[in-house]
Structures are given as structure tokens and as C-alpha cells.
Amino acid sequence: FMSSTLRSSLLAAALAAITIAAQAQEVKIGMVNPERILSEAAPAKAATARLKSEFSGREAQISKEGSALKAAIEKFQKDAPTMAETTRNTREKQLAAQEDDFQNKRRQFQEDLANRRNAELEKIQENSKRIIKQIAESGKYSVVLGAESVVYIQPQYDITDQVIKAFDAGK
């Protein structure tokens, strides 16, 4: 007694539900933790070591200059009341110039370090994306999300360890 329109509508709804259920079963979602890759993967550790060795000497030199400048300013502040005015003014100008020079060196160091760190990070991210794509394709993942956007995922869908192993193997 059902009208043919109602029967068609119910059939269409049932087919749509079956199709959606079938599609839902095919979706495989993975998750990767980029912070772990940056802290645990051998290439990331090597990049950190390269940056440290490349910039540690300059950092030590700047720190040494900063300490010397601080000591000179403290000595000037202690001696200033007993100095002749022209000597005090000359020394004050010298210290101001030294402080400007020091601030410029420190700023340039920080810029250089940030630029190199960003260059290293970019290489690691490019390789990570390539490896994640390979793992996603071979594991038939529909989507791979970053850990920062995931509240919960079952451990078997966390592919971070696979990415780190592939990264370490140089794949």
C-alpha cells in the first residue's frame, strides 16, 4: 500500500546510508607528532648539534664581551663621582658606543642563528612531509593529522615512530 514515491524515497535513503557506512569503513586516519620528530629523529638531532657547533663560539664571544662591558659600566659608575667632567663625559660616550656595538653584535647573532635554525627546520619539515606521505600511501591512510589537532587517537594510528624510523634510516 505504500506509494511508489514513498517507497523510492525510503529505498534511496537506505542506499545512501549503506553507501555512507561503506565509505566510513574505508577511511583510515593517522596521526603524527611533529615535536617528537624534531626531538627524536637522528637528522633533527644532527641539525641541532650542527647549529650548536656553528654558533657556540660566537655565542661565547658575545657573552664574554657582554660581561666585560657590564664590568666596565660598573667600574665607570663607581669611579664617575671622582672623575674630571671632561674625562667622565668622554668615558660615558665611549661606553655608550661600546654598548651600541654590543647590542648590534648580539642582534646580528640572534638573526643569523634564527635564519640558520629556520633553514635547518625547513629541510627537516620537507623530509618529514615526504616520509609521512610515503607512509600514508603505503599504509592506505586517508588522512594524517598533526598531534596538535588531535584530542585522542588509538595508539595503532599514531605513525610517529614509523616516521622517526624512516627518517633515521635516511629514506
Image (cartoon, helix red, strand yellow):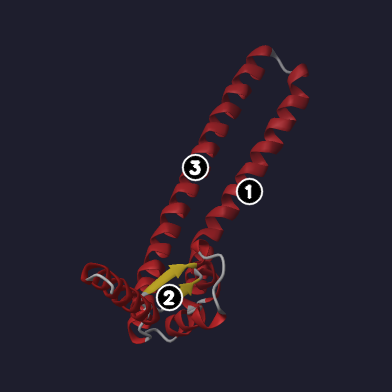
Query: Which element type, helix, strand or loop, lies under badge 3?
Result: helix
In which quadrant will I find the N terminus?
A: bottom left
| In this view, the mark in front (2 or 1) | 2
Residue 17 relative to residue 158: left or right = left
| Mark sitting earlier along the chain (2/3) | 2
- Badge 2 crowding class, 10 Å Cα cut-off, few under 14, some 14 to 19, many 20 or more, is some
Q: CA distance from mark 2 to mark 1?
A: 52 Å
The tag earlier along the polypeptide, 2 or 1, is 2
Image x and y of residue 144, in percent: 41, 72
Front: mark 3 or 1? 3
Does 45 sit above or below residue 139?
A: above
Identity, as a three-letter code, of the amino acid under mark 2: Ile
Above or below 157: residue 52: above
Q: Quadrant of residue 152?
A: bottom right
Residue 29 badge: 2
Q: CA distance from mark 3 to mark 1?
A: 15 Å
User: Of the residues under marks 3 and 1, which one precedes in the sequence?
Assistant: 1
Tag 2–tag 3 contact (CB < 8 Å): no
| Closer to us: 34 or 107 | 34
Taking depth in this image into account, of 8 and 169 the one nearest to the observer is: 8
- Taking the spot 60% from the left edge, 29% from the top edge, the residue there is 95
Judging by the rendered image, the residue that carries numbered circle 3 is 107
Q: Amino acid at mark 3?
A: Arg
Q: Which quadrant does the C terminus fall into? A: bottom left
Between the C-alphas of marks 2 and 3, the distance is: 44 Å
- Helix, strand or loop status at disc 2: strand
